[in-house]
């Protein structure tokens, strides 16, 4: 089969012929139809420090996908051949305290497909039955391919009660934008989304309905807060940029006793004004991945009741034209970019 492989320890990805994965008795073979490119894939593509330290070479990359079940292992009972599916990309163990207690998303032995297990930028993917998410025949295959990052957005947004609350989201990447739309649907009061990139904020306006966009390079966040009628701080903060200035701004604008959920991954460690966290009695919660499988349940329920994320998809390429897609991703002027694996 064809697969996009991190074949060399240098910038780039290479379309190669590799064997179709063999499935274990508890695994499912998925024929991949669409994939989406994630920021993580860009780290691996560019071969930055994080990628060099975390990704063995060679490795088939990619973890955002939709496809159809091609074959099932001998012990698989929950999933049928021919079903439309996506899947949880974090493969957990069964040894740790958290895994044994059913807190699968907190298992320290977690491995990521497309990072340290063979990934989904390929014609076929082998996945444990436990991780397969059946979607129904009518489910939009492109939406199937963006459920993984939508799950990050849903997990972070729903980490704290946001009904009737004022929410600050820092970072209008795909996940920040999807989180804003999720907050709108979930009943937040005011929602403010910040970035330093106008293209991203303009694009975010096409996906969201009632979120206030702020470019913090040329707008004063506190002035915007007062313009939209806020007299105190944000009740809930969702950090989705990984950038220190965004985090500092969040600390400065949170209400005393506010709740923060941290998804953004800093490129390198940065100092934090702990005195502000203590003095404001803030709660900070780190978010990793998606909750298995409560996030998937909530996300699919929200889609079923009208959450429409189609506008997030801005570009589509045949898988064979992957290089054009990665070049475009590097410009930063994209929503979600889809690769079509029926065109290899
Ligand atoms: P992205 O890189 O596309 O988006 C980040 C955005 O933050 C960019 O638009 C950037 O312009 C913006 N930004 C930079 N500096 C800023 C500032 N000072 N103020 C406001 N915005 C600023 O990333 P994404 O794919 O949307 O993911 C969001 C973050 O979540 C990334 O840091 C990513 O690495 C991380 N992530 C974490 C997990 C997890 O499990 N914890 C999973 C997926 C992604
Ligand atoms: Zn991803």
Image (cartoon, helix red, strand yellow):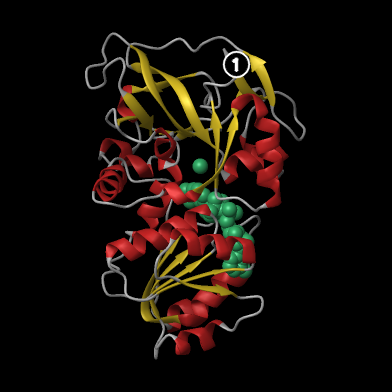
User: At which x and y percent is residue 21?
Assistant: 49, 13
Location of residue 29 by image quarter: top left
Q: Residue furthest right?
A: 10
Answer whether residue 242 is visible to the viewer in this image: no
Image quadrant where one finds the C terminus: top right
Determine whether 90 is above or below 228 in the image. above
Looking at the image, which is closer to me, 39 or 56? 39
Determine whether 13 is above or below 270 in the image. above
In the rendered structure, the answer to whether residue 263 lies left or right of residue 299 reads right
Crowdedness near tag 1: few (<14), some (14–19) or many (≥20) residues, C-alpha within 10 Å? some
In the rendered structure, the answer to whether residue 277 lies left or right of residue 6 reads left
Count of residue discs: 1
Quick check: is the Cβ at mark 1 less than 8 Å away from ligand 2?
no
Image quadrant where one finds the N terminus: top right
Determine whether 102 is above or below 128 in the image. below
User: At which x and y percent is residue 309?
Assistant: 40, 49
User: At which x and y percent is residue 105?
Assistant: 36, 43
Answer whether residue 130 is visible to the viewer in this image: yes
Looking at the image, which is closer to me, 313 or 18? 313
Q: Residue at x 44, y 84 (%)?
A: 279
User: At which x and y percent is residue 36?
Assistant: 52, 37
Q: Residue at x 53, y 24 (%)?
A: 341
Location of residue 195 by image quarter: bottom right
Residue at mark 1:
2
Task: Identify the secondary structure beneath mark 1.
Answer: strand
Determine whether 251 is above or below 63 in the image. below
Location of residue 163 by image quarter: bottom left
Q: Residue at x 59, y 84 (%)?
A: 220
């Amino acid at each position: 089969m064809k697969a996009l492989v991190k074949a060399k320890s240098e910038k780039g990805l290479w379309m190669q012929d590799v064997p179709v994965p063999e499935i274990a008795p508890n695994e499912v073979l998925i024929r991949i139809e669409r994939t989406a490119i994630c920021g993580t894939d860009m780290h691996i593509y560019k071969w930055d420090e994080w990628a060099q330290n975390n990704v063995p070479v060679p490795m088939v990359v990619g973890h955002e996908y939709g496809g159809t079940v091609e074959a099932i292992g001998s012990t698989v009972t929950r999933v049928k051949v021919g079903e439309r599916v996506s899947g949880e990309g974090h493969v957990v163990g069964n040894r740790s305290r958290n895994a044994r207690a059913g807190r699968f998303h907190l298992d320290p032995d977690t491995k990521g497909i497309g990072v340290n297990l063979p990934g989904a930028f390929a014609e076929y993917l082998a996945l444990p039955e436990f991780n397969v998410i059946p979607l129904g025949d009518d489910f939009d295959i492109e939406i199937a391919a963006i459920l993984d990052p939508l799950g990050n957005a849903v997990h972070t947004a729903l980490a704290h009660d946001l009904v009737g609350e004022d929410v600050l989201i820092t970072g209008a990447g795909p996940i920040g934008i999807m989180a804003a739309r999720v907050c709108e649907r979930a009943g937040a009061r005011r929602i403010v989304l910040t970035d330093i990139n106008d293209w991203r904020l303009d694009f975010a306006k096409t996906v969201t309905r009632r979120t206030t966009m702020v470019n913090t390079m040329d707008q004063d966040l506190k002035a915007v807060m007062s313009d939209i009628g806020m007299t105190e701080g944000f009740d809930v903060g969702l950090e989705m940029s990984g950038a220190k200035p965004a985090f500092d701004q969040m600390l400065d604008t949170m209400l005393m006793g506010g709740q923060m959920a941290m998804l953004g991954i800093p490129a390198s460690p940065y100092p934090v004004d702990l005195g502000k966290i203590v003095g404001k009695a803030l709660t900070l919660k780190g978010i990793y991945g998606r909750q298995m499988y409560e996030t998937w349940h909530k996300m699919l329920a929200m889609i079923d009741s009208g959450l429409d994320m189609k506008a997030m998809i801005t570009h589509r390429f045949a898988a064979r034209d992957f290089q054009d897609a990665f070049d475009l991703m590097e410009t930063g002027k994209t929503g979600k970019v889809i690769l079509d694996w029926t065109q290899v």
